[in-house]
Image (spheres, rainbow, N blue to C red):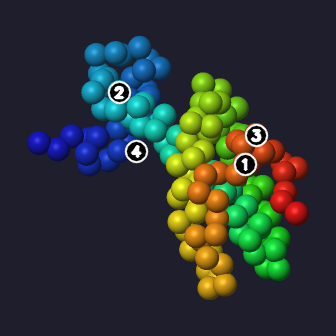
Amino acid sequence: MLTLYDTDFNRWALEQAAALKAGRLQQLDLEHLAEEIEALSKSDKRAIKSYLVRILFHLLKWQYQPGQRSESWENSIADSRLAIRLILEDSPSLKAYPDEVLEDAYRQARRKNPQNPAVDPGQFPVSCPWTVEQVLRDDFWLV
């Protein structure tokens, strides 16, 4: 049998919020609320890792395709750094997470196609050549 959670998520969420605010705990859909709260944490972790992959990919291109450096690469790196910083401001308990996933994010970035046949991803270092502090620092650029 389908529930409001299944058929109209937005309405379900608004009704759950109203019940919480009014203290009508008996009206709460605890199972789905717990799932959604867990999903929020996973969402922030996925976002951090995705932004790290983007930064690392562009840093690799920055280093190995210096003749093609562009403002869009800079903007992508800067925007991704800011996005991670904002997530970490909202959720300081995730401060160590970028370091935990740096190597996996680097492996993913390393496998991405730099869209330049002259660049062989096999020439990229096997492990991440940068620290998380460098990768996330606004003034870190390869020359």
Residue drawn 65% across the image and 26% down it: 92
Residue highlighted by disc 4: 10
Pick the front one: 76 or 99: 99
**Which residue in the structure is indicated by mark 1?**
130
In percent of width and height, residue 12 lies at 35, 38
Q: Quadrant of the N terminus?
A: top left
49 displayed left or right of 2: right
Sequence-first disc among 4 and 1? 4
Q: State how far apart marks 4 and 2 are (Cα).
A: 16 Å
- Residue located beneath label 3 in the image: 133
Q: CA distance from mark 3 to mark 4?
A: 39 Å
Q: Is residue 54 visible?
A: no
Q: Residue furthest left?
A: 1
Q: Which residue is mark 2?
A: 34
What secondary structure is found at the residue carrying circle 2?
helix
Tag 3: amino acid:
Glu
